[in-house]
């Protein structure tokens, strides 16, 4: 039907192809909206957003292919051979291929429009059953239609922003000399020691093998208990102590029965790990990383970010630009607790030394106290995992959290404990068995070095930069308690 196609690049735009069938260039809607394209004979492929008919004997068809927020207007004359049979009956959601000439638009808000020489209907969408009609739908309702919500303005824009953040992540760490590492999704190690892990098993759940009254996991596929990973950090440390600097970027899982707007059971984590990095190096890397993400998304996703600024969170772009330009302040955990205790602010959760800071505490510190980005460090050892390096005071560890206005914590990390004797003592404190981490302990036996790293959840940063209120709308297919649809 379309003949053969070969990839081309036109005006530096992505998604430009040459159709050998009729000589028309297949280009994206984003490329077609470029005024430099006026006069070109092109082909557009996409989905109908609206259609309205003129008494003058033609139809205006708004088409989008996901490459940009705004649609491209197609003018289809009544003289087209399939006008009455196909074009005049086009409904929202139908897919079409339109060929014609790009001309300067007479309408406001658009540089170009396509005067169609042909419009072919590829797939119809029954208006009686197609859910995405012209009215606005709530984000909660759109979660029920996760297979269709990418066609809406909000989720198209969000997906493009998420894509840019992902690309910027890879580019940043490559520029910094880090190697991309794929760590296991199935693991026998609980990195955080919290036990909130999804078990992976092939054992028959209706007839579990028992030994001494307990499930005999020696008969399982891996011969031991196995889980979905909560972090690639420990495996990342293996490669950091061989290659110097590595980063992981993959799915992680938490079996935490939480229904808040900030939690998911499946999410994507970015975790760099660097040998010979101490805590100060780690904090500086995190600051540069946040600045790169903000710089790229504000400069390369301008149309989408303008949409979020206008429709989702007014003032969003200015708020992000302020974080980008203001130096990150540093406070110890102890200093932060003193500030909170003297603030006179009434918090839902009381704050005292030794307790974990809540989102309300973090947001007060970053939004009201420093009025900008903030890095807290040196947390109590009693509330942090075993692998964080202990300070000489015996009370704190070299942990750090990056806080930003509007969200609170966006990055969590630490310098890792490189001293064998201290690591073994910390494992004993937290009830971990040395035999389960024998390989991790070996890293301290054979050429140990100071090293550091951090973790950033991609969905958390997507939520921050788009202003979306619920993290379930920041991932294509959210996994939450009681929900694994699609």
Image (tube, grey):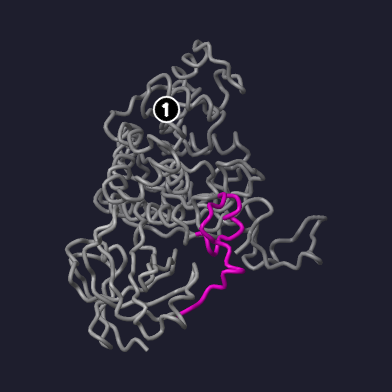
Q: Which residue is mark 1?
A: 377
Q: Which residues are magenta?
A: 122-149
Q: Judge by depth and name the residue closer to the eye, 414 or 65.
A: 65
**Where 119 falls versus 448 (above or below)?**
below
- Left/right placement of residue 303 relative to residue 192 reads left
In the structure shown, which secondary structural element does the residue marked by tag 1 occupy?
Answer: strand
Q: Position of residue 387 (x, y in %)?
A: 49, 39
- Left/right placement of residue 434 relative to residue 157 reads right
Residue at the (30%, 68%) spot, across then down: 28
Q: Position of residue 322 (x, y in %)?
A: 31, 31
Residue at the (33%, 81%) spot, across then down: 118
Quarter of the rendering containing residue 258:
top right
Q: Judge by depth and name the residue closer to the eye, 116 or 391.
A: 116
Q: Judge by depth and name the residue closer to the eye, 79 or 164.
A: 79
Residue 413 counted in the magenta span: no
> Quick one: quadrant of the N terminus?
bottom left
């Amino acid at each position: 039907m379309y003949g053969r196609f070969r990839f081309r690049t036109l005006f530096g735009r992505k998604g430009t192809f040459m159709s050998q069938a009729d000589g028309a260039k297949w280009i994206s809607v984003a490329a077609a909206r470029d005024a430099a394209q006026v006069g070109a004979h092109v082909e557009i492929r996409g989905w109908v957003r609206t259609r309205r008919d003129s008494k003058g004997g033609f139809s205006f068809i708004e088409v989008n292919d996901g490459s940009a927020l705004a649609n491209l207007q197609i003018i289809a004359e009544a003289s087209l051979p399939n006008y009455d049979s196909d074009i005049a009956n086009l409904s929202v959601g139908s897919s079409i291929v339109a060929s014609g000439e790009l001309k300067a638009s007479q309408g406001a808000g658009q540089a170009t429009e396509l005067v169609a020489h042909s419009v072919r209907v590829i797939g119809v969408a029954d208006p009686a059953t197609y859910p995405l009609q012209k009215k606005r739908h709530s984000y909660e309702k759109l979660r029920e239609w996760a297979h269709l919500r990418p066609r809406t303005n909000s989720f198209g824009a969000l997906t493009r922003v998420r894509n840019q953040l992902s690309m910027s992540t890879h580019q940043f760490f490559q520029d910094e000399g880090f190697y991309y590492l794929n760590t296991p999704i199935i693991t026998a190690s609980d990195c955080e020691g919290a036990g909130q892990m999804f078990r992976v098993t092939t054992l028959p759940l209706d007839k579990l093998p028992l030994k001494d009254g307990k499930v005999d996991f020696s008969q399982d596929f891996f011969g031991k208990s196995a889980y979905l990973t909560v972090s690639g950090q420990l495996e990342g440390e293996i490669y950091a102590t061989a290659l110097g600097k590595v980063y992981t970027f993959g799915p992680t899982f938490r079996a935490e029965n939480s229904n808040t707007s900030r939690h998911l059971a499946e999410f994507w984590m970015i975790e760099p790990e660097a040998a010979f990095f101490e805590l100060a190096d780690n904090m500086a890397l995190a600051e540069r990383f946040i600045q790169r993400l903000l710089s790229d998304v504000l400069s390369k996703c301008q149309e989408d970010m303008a949409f979020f600024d206008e429709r989702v969170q007014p003032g969003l772009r200015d708020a992000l630009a302020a974080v980008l330009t203001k130096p990150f302040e540093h406070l110890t955990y102890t200093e932060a607790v003193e500030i909170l205790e003297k603030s006179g602010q009434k918090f839902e959760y009381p704050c005292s030394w030794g307790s974990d800071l809540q989102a309300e505490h973090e947001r007060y510190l970053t939004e009201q106290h420093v009025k900008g980005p903030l890095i807290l460090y040196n947390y109590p050892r009693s509330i942090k995992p075993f692998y964080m390096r202990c300070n000489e005071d015996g009370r704190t560890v070299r942990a750090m959290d990056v806080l930003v206005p509007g969200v609170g914590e966006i990055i969590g990390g630490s310098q890792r404990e490189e001293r064998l004797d201290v690591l073994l003592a910390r494992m004993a404190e937290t009830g971990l068995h040395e035999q389960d981490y024998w390989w991790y302990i070996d890293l301290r036996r054979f050429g140990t070095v100071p090293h550091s790293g951090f973790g950033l959840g991609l969905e958390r940063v997507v939520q921050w930069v788009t202003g979306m209120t619920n993290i379930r709308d920041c991932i294509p297919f959210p996994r939450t308690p009681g929900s694994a649809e699609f």
